[in-house]
Image (tube, grey):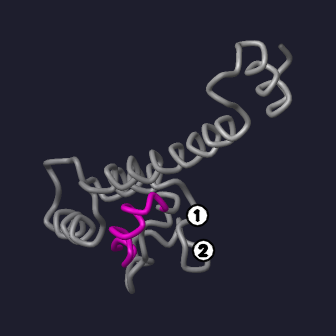
Amino acid sequence: MKLIQNFAELLHKIKLPSPEKCFVLEEGDDKYIKKWIQNGEITCELEILFKWLSEEYKLKKTKLSPAEQKLAAEVKKRFPMDQWRAIKIFSDHQKKYRYYKRAVEDVKSRTSPRMNEQAIMTIFSSSWGINT
């Protein structure tokens, strides 16, 4: 599993997709996570997938058999176990930022700096169905 090729570009343009779509599956990933893949895409939230990986392959355990150690090492090498949280944070933040930025721009386009409180409150009630 690796980051999408244009991650840095999308990060700077504040256009990251959902956390799950920030990663591309590589050949052989299905061997480890076929339960969570459908049509070549991850079918669950990133947090669920990585929690499952950690539990399923005993990645936090210290006493493993040699076969379990080898499997855990392969999973750690293939999946970004230590980095996925940062990708999720960036993606989620940008998603929220885009939403709030649109809301602020909408209010700014409907107001002027000289409007009084009552006039501003009518914009909120008519725009968003809020009763004042």
Quadrant of the image containing the C terminus: top right
User: Whole-Å distance between the Cαs marked 1 and 2?
Assistant: 6 Å
Disc 2 packing (10 Å; few <14; some 14–19; many ≥20):
few
Q: Amino acid at mark 1?
A: Thr
**In this view of the protein, which residue sits in the foreground, 54 or 96?**
96
Disc 1 packing (10 Å; few <14; some 14–19; many ≥20):
few
In the rendered image, residue 83, in percent from the top left (x then y), is placed at 27, 56
Give the image quarter of residue 129.
top right
In the rendered image, residue 85, in percent from the top left (x then y), is placed at 34, 49
Q: Are marks 1 and 2 in contact (CB under 8 Å)?
A: yes
SS under mark 1: loop
Give the image quarter of residue 27.
bottom left
Disc 1: which residue: 43
Check the image and name the residue furthest to the bottom. 27
Q: Is 13 located above or below residue 55 in the figure?
A: below
**In this view of the protein, which residue sits in the foreground, 102 or 94?**
102
Q: Which residues are magenta?
A: 1-15
Quadrant of the image containing the N terminus: bottom left
State the residue at coordinates (86%, 29%).
Answer: 126
State the residue at coordinates (42%, 77%).
Answer: 25
Q: Amino acid at mark 2?
A: Gln
Give the image quarter of residue 103.
top right
Give the numbered dot on residue 51. none
**Which of marks 2 and 1 precedes in the sequence?**
2
State the residue at coordinates (45%, 45%).
Answer: 93
**In this view of the protein, which residue sits in the foreground, 107 or 64?**
107
Disc 2: which residue: 38
